[in-house]
Image: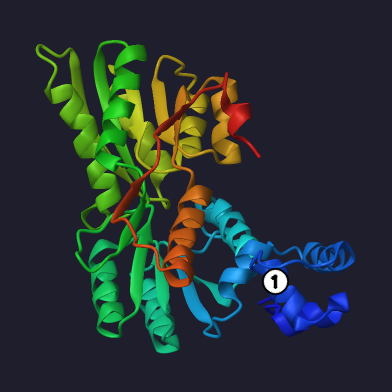
Amino acid sequence: MDKKLTIKDIAQLAGVSKGTVDRVLHKRGKVSQKALDSINAVLEQADYEPNLIARNLKNNKIYSICVVLPNPESDSYWQPCIKGIEQAKKEFKAFNLSISSYYFDPEDTESFIAVNKSVLNLAPDAVLLAPLFYKEALDAVEKYTEQDILVNTFNNQLESEEIRNFVGQDLHQSGRVAAKLIHSIAEKGQIAIIHFDEKIKNAVHMQEKEKGFRNYFSQKENSDYEVTTLKLKRKNYETKLEDFLKENPKLTGIFITTSKAHQIAEIIDKTKNNTISLIGYDLLDKNISFLNKGTIDFLINQNPKQQVYLGLSFLVDHFIFGKEINPSTLLPIDIVNSENASYYME
């Protein structure tokens, strides 16, 4: 954590009195141009905003925020979150803040439980949580709340009054958007919803996407589409998917509810079946590659970097400026195709 400058520190570095620094920061009273230039030079070199310092100089408490999320090395979807966390650290370094990240295995509920237990023992002021496992996440939120630890969530929504804020997309509506897209491009026939690598009963985010998807087609009278669900595991997904494609020759569209669309697209490419429309999630490099190739038709961008950054910024605003936290912050549902994908890439 970068050291917070005090009025005394600024005065010594600028070669002026503490009273002169105070007048500059609070924009009251007159100071010489030389003193003003010296103080601003110190602030600029330290990469601090004077108005931010002025609000925080008298606050000696160090607020501790822990971010609990899946390990990006296990699932690259979470990789942009690192950039979002670093952006928040840089932007808010003028304040007495400690922002730390803690990773769990996205395929292991025991890892999730263990990491949250470790964070609980640290007794931070707040936790920003990616609640990948629904039941275990509810239990973790309850334990944090019992210790007066504020909890915000991102990416996956939990039904809990103890959560102060959620940042992410309306997943039910996201499923409907995917259905509308596939309805517009897929030939009449069978459409598959594919859940990949997660326990669907404990993965509410996938359930909500499927509900929204099916809800769209259920409202269509005399629909010419049959919607089915396929659950795949990493160990044998190639064989199971290939068998599914052979057994369902009328398949015209696939909706993948996670960021694993590239793994489905790879199999589709091997079978040389370019009549199947694919809709997936997230701007992973491999997904973008198949998008540009034409195997994937559309990707829905969930913007994990923005999710975690906003989650942290709301906590900072609450602790430093006393702002109320809104219960929900829904991000736009961005539709990405091969023509506009480059505009979303950093």
Q: Quadrant of residue 251?
A: top left
Q: Quadrant of residue 16?
A: bottom right
Q: What colouring method underlies this structural image?
A: rainbow
Q: What type is the residue that disc 1 sits on?
A: Arg
Q: Is residue 134 left or right of residue 131?
A: left
Q: Can residue 105 be seen?
A: no
Name the spot of residue 89 as percent of width and height, x first. Answer: 61, 65
* Residue toward you, 295 or 19: 19
Q: Residue at x 56, y 28 (%)?
A: 290
Q: Quadrant of residue 115?
A: bottom left
Q: Is residue 191 left or right of residue 92?
A: left
Q: Is residue 156 above or below residue 242?
A: below
Residue at the outermost left position:
221
Name the spot of residue 258 as percent of width and height, x first. Answer: 39, 43
Name the spot of residue 163 as percent of width and height, x first. Answer: 27, 65
| Disc 1: which residue | 23
